[in-house]
Amino acid sequence: MARQDQLAALAAEAEGCRACDLWNRATQVVFGAGPATARIVLVGEQPGDAEDRAGAPFVGPAGRVLDEALADAHIERGDVYVTNAVKHFKWEPRGKRRIHQRPNRTEIVACRRWLEAELDALPAKAVVVALGATAGQALFGPSFRVGTARGQELHLDGRPAVATIHPSAVLRAEAEERAELLDGLVADLRRAARLAG
């Protein structure tokens, strides 16, 4: 089976996933997106409100920050595979809004099979970029810390890997910090591009 067909089959299968309770409140599964030939794989935490409604990863405010960082790093969004450690949106109501809640270890572990299957379907030399703590812990284990891992030479099952902040960290930062955080994200993405050759 061709890689793209394999990814499409996985996405279809994931729609019926009931490995944890998150499917109950989510609108839909948000599986990864991008070419099966991608040399860079970006792994985030989970879909947000906009992603849950659209059914696509990184299309909301954090996605716009990611797009800006990719452009500054001279990486085409269409050339990377973008996914999340957890495939359903975890949220709590606050008035009329749905507010993100961080997935717990059980939910991360329940979704691990999908993330592993996505990585198996992508090129063996693709560089994996962990966007934030949850993605890093899903990939490297619960002791992973972004601050410690950033700038380190990481490997994931023989693949080169890079750790960086999640784009939402830029959104949450005070105005004077945002440029510095975005610059750091761009530098980490450039590093991934160099490793990808």
Image (cartoon, rainbow, N blue to C red):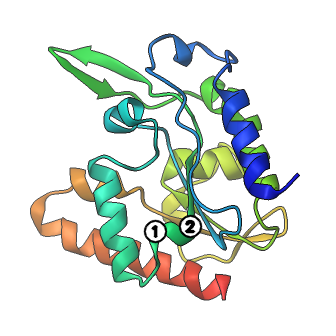
Instruction: Name the amino acid type tagged 2.
Output: Val
Residue 95: give x, y in percent of width and height.
Answer: 15, 14
Residue 5: give x, y in percent of width and height.
Answer: 76, 49
Depth check, front residue: 163 or 117: 117
Say which quarter of the image contains residue 176: bottom left
Instruction: Name the amino acid type tagged 1.
Output: Arg
On residue 190, the disc is: none
Depth check, front residue: 128 or 177: 128
Q: Is residue 5 left or right of residue 165?
A: right
Residue 57, above or below 97: below
The residue tagged 2 is 80
Depth check, front residue: 2 or 46: 2
Residue at image location 48% in from the left, 83% down from the top: 190
As drawn, the residue found furthest toward the left would be 175
Residue 128: give x, y in percent of width and height.
Answer: 65, 65
Say which quarter of the image contains residue 127: bottom right
Residue 16: give x, y in percent of width and height.
Answer: 67, 19
Say which quarter of the image contains residue 98: top left
Circle 2 Cα neighbour tier, 10 Å, few/some/many (<14 / 14–19 / ≥20): many
Depth check, front residue: 184 or 74: 74
Residue 32, above or below 39: above
Residue at image location 55% in from the left, 17% down from the top: 23
Check if mark 2's residue and mark 1's residue have beta carbons within 8 Å: yes
On residue 77, the disc is: 1
Residue 22, above or below 50: above
Element type where label 2 sits in the image: loop
Q: Is residue 86 left or right of residue 67?
A: right
Q: Quadrant of the C terminus?
A: bottom right
Q: Is residue 115 left or right of residue 157?
A: left
Circle 1 Cα neighbour tier, 10 Å, few/some/many (<14 / 14–19 / ≥20): some
Residue at image location 23% in from the left, 54% down from the top: 171
Q: How many marks?
A: 2
